[in-house]
Image: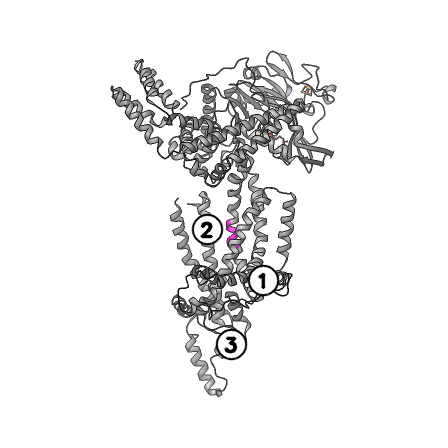
Amino acid sequence: MELRYYIIRRFLILIPTLFGLVLLTFILLRAIPTSDLIASFISQKATAQERVIEKQQAIAYLGLNQPLPVQFLYYLNDIIHGNLGVMYTSFYTGPVMGGIERFLPYTLELSIATVILSILIAIPLGTYIGARPNSPSDAIGRIFSLGVYAMPIFWLALLAQIIFGKNIGIFGSYGLPISGEGYPTTTKVPWIVNNVSEPTHMLFVDALLHGNLTIAYSAFIHLILPVGVLTLSILAGLLRFIRAGMVDTANQEFVKTARAKGVPEKLVLRRHVRKNALLPSVTVIGLLMAGLLGGVVVIEYVFQLRGMGRLTLATITGLNIQFYGVAGTVLFFGIILMITNLIVDVVYAFLDPRIRY
Amino acid sequence: MITQEENVKEISASKPYIVVKDLVTQFFTSKGIVKALDKVSFEIYPGEIYGLVGESGCGKSVTSTSIMDLIPDPPGRIMGGEIYIDSFNILSDLRSLAKIRIKSETEVKIKRSKRANKRHNEILSQIRGNKISMIFQEPFLALNPTMRIGDQIMESILLHNILSISDGIIKRHNLNSNDLDKFMKNLNGENDHLKRKKIINNFVSEFGIQEFEESLNSLIENSTDDSYVKTEIINMVQENKKNIDMKLISEIREYYYYKNQLFQLTLEEIQAERTGETAIRNQKHEQIKALRRYINNKYFVLRMKLRLAEKHYMAPFRKEARRRAIELLSLVNIAGPEIVVDSYPHELSGGMQQRAMIAMALASNPKMLIADEPTTALDVTTQAQILEIIKDLNELIGMGVLFITHDLAVIAEMCDRVGVMYAGNLVEETSTTEIFNDPKHPYTVGLMNSVPRADRKREKEIRLDTIPGTVPNLITPPSGCRFHPRCKFAMDICSLKKPKLVEISPQHKVACFLYSDESEVD
Ligand SMILES: Nc1ncnc2c1ncn2[C@@H]1O[C@H](COP(=O)(O)OP(=O)(O)O)[C@@H](O)[C@H]1O
Ligand code: SF4
Ligand SMILES: [Mg+2]
């Protein structure tokens, strides 16, 4: 009955899900032929005999001679200790975990800004449109949604760069940065250089917390276009969904009851329709998050930003596939999705009294 | 438990509370125009239970929804007629609401006027839930799933009773020793136990301190020291005064007072519009505009406050409303109203939900309740209990009821008068006794024969064994008397002209050419 118990239960369910996710990445790893991986341990100059020995050593080192369940246990053990292996790419070389730590904050900053912005726009706009089905504003909303929905996100991003980009867009040199160029690098940010606190690791937020407006401004203008494009892509679906929720709820019996009580039309929408209409949209936000992570990969590439998306991409676009890199990033994206869904479920339970049992 | 004893039931030659005249309601669908109601007329008097009976799909719900003016648009519209509620015609501005061009059955252009509809809705929201309330067939669907029962009832109370609640709070605030002296004098002048209780009851209601009624009762029982009792009462009231910002209360009261004025002016404007008195209409229009501007300016801050933190600023009102909500819940026989008030609809059984709906409908003491098949979705025992509550409310508070059902046994049990509907027409109307003993219209006769009467067993559906054929499609209804394809007595005229509902004997109206030659002119 109580929300608290519900949250605890959802947390407990997280454990088997997590286990399943780890198992899945393990299977993924083992599904790829291991010859490449082993080859990377063998020196090119060695003689044929040395190679055989090196190969055997590599197999033993990697634990590939153990039975699969034992391999899985090793894998599990490593993950629990935060050891996701090492990757070697031109984008980043080092422990996968270290890479995630370094590039995640930027992606988080992008995604959180996008989610907040989309919700802030979608709720008022969606409820406005949904309250007036088949009106001109509804038609405009529909054209917008379908139009944006039909556009691949990279194209949308290129379009945004062409229109608003610095030096190439309609604003000339006053345009917005279209690449990571000019983004305050770690070597210049005083609190990183001097090892002062980095509360969130997100540059814009940290800069604000440190009261350094110059850096905050620079970080902010670099966020505008990528966040804008990501928001557009999410907004398209979200708007349609909220609109559908509003129309659907407005036809429900209890809305008639509200009118029969004498609730004025504005309050009917605000008090009775809106909340019930937005409930299903909350769950959709969880789904959109998955799309968002996919979008982030593309956006970071197009805008040349150094985030998780680029790291993920780097693991498969170099000369050799970075096994550990792939497994690590996939695992990580999976965990992020699970956490988002947990948050969504808790928020939903908080909003909808019928959920708690 | 029903405790209010005022207004004991009276069906008299008084003015009808509801008058429906030539009501035409249609639905514009892709298959054609559904002529759901075709000139339905009837009247309901204060304090009576009027039953509406007929097969499913004959237009009972459309009739009741039209009275509340809640026909879903699109696809539906009230196309003509008059509906008076407490002598005010809610359809008086019907013409101005929309321009309708009917090119063909499936091609209808409706151009709604935004301004007129806004004004219309403002007026209706003052009438609905206030002068007339409605409960529905499926209480589970009719309650907002994400709002606590108490909040839903309180919403009704707060919508229509701000003035009286603030009066109560102000009166309590100003309670002085004179009032107390008067009260004690009244009390001491009376020896009869029950009458003393009544005096106490009046006193606590007058000053809005109902929550102290019990402690006051026992205090007075056990103490003979007048001055002690007086100090205690003062203490109780002091407790209640805490945290109440009287300036805010009177400001809210004033705001709502002006809003009421605005409503009155709007009614007058519409009246003048209808009678064609342009000068008066324009004058009212200017007055409304001026008053609206005045309210918007003067209460801008208050409205912002209420918009942003209504729960906080309305707290004293909400407290009163909550007390009243609990009172209403116990009035409809809900056990543990203090718990139910904080429950969500899904935590209650169907019967409890319907009771909560009734409590909500009673929030503003409406003189009329519309009950559209209120028990159809409930199990048999619960049905009986709900029916009894409605009957009690009718007898003790004198609340009129428009009771809709397809169940003749329920009609026999509940109603004073009955209207029989067939395919969007009222075909017969008379007292309950007469409809069972001497039905006139061939359709009514068929209805009566279809129910096993000897054992009075309740049937879920009326089985029309004795009436051949099926209910007609209302997009292309039969010409003339809509019943003629199924009528054993059909004559030539029946398919040509539509019989008029006429009084063939005192209190007995029938629309059938067997009893009268009169037909509708159109
Ligand atoms: N929303 C609607 N759209 C189209 N037709 C409707 C609608 N509501 C009611 N009707 C039609 O109006 C007629 C009367 O329906 P109703 O009043 O619900 O019957 P009942 O007597 O069972 O309550 C039916 O023929 C029905 O098809
Ligand atoms: S008017 Fe004619 S068709 Fe209609 S009920 Fe009477 S006899 Fe039958
Ligand atoms: Mg019905």
Callouts 2 and 3 on one subunit: yes
Tell me: residue A114, above or below residue B393: below
Q: Which residue is mark 3?
A: A36
Left or right of A4 on screen, residue B163: right
* Image coords of residue B521 (percent x, y): 72, 20
Question: Any mark on residue A345, and which?
Answer: 2
Q: Which residue type carries mark 1?
A: Leu
Discs 3/1, front: 1
Tell me: residue B313, above or below residue B280: below
Q: Quadrant of residue B474?
A: top right
Separation of disc 2 and disc 3 at Cα? 42 Å
Discs 2/3, front: 2
Q: Quadrant of residue A303?
A: bottom right
State yes or no: Cβ of the residue under disc 3 lies below 8 Å from any atom of ligand 1.
no
Quick one: SS at disc 3? helix
- Asked whether B380 or A219 is in front, the reply is A219
Q: Which residue is mark 1?
A: A176
Q: Which residue type carries mark 2?
A: Asp
- Asked whether B316 or B427 is in front, the reply is B316
Q: Which residue type carries mark 3?
A: Asp
Disc on the earlier residue, 3 or 1: 3
